[in-house]
Amino acid sequence: MADDDFYTRDRPDHPELPEDRPRGGGPEDAPARSGSRRGKPVWAVIALVALVIILLALFMP
């Protein structure tokens, strides 16, 4: 049996399956807001910790 015969045997006329997890979506699927409110405080804490480390490195003998 040739490779072409193997892939054409026992296949339905329209072998398309519906997606089980559709991708994309319309505007109604968009999140209510695009940013997060946690982002700014997290960066502020990181900057504060970095500043303390830099100050300790400068003033430690």
Image (spheres, rainbow, N blue to C red):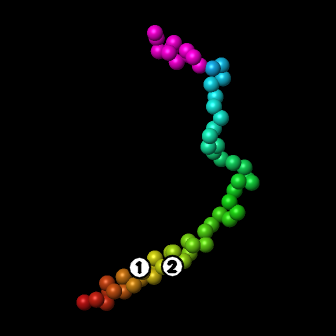
Instruction: Identify residue for label 1.
Output: 50
Q: Amino acid at mark 1?
A: Ala
Q: Is residue 40 magenta?
A: no
Magenta residues span 1-11
Along the horizontal axis of the image, is 51 left or right of 14?
left
Vertical placement of 41 versus 29: above or below? below
Residue 7 placement (x, y as % from top left): 52, 18
Task: From the viewer's side, name the closer residue of 11 and 24.
Answer: 11
Vertical placement of 11 versus 29: above or below? above
Q: Are the residues tagged 1 and 2 within 8 Å (C-beta)? A: no
- Circle nearer the N terminus (1, 2): 2
Residue 32 placement (x, y as % from top left): 70, 63
For the point 68% across and 65% down, which residue is it? Answer: 33
Q: Quadrant of the C terminus?
A: bottom left
For the point 62% across and 40% down, which residue is it? Answer: 20
Instruction: Identify residue for label 2.
Output: 44
Secondary structure type for disc 2: helix
Task: From the viewer's side, name the closer residue of 6 and 51.
Answer: 6
Q: Determine which quarter of the picture holds residue 51.
A: bottom left
For the point 65% across and 35% down, which residue is it? Answer: 18
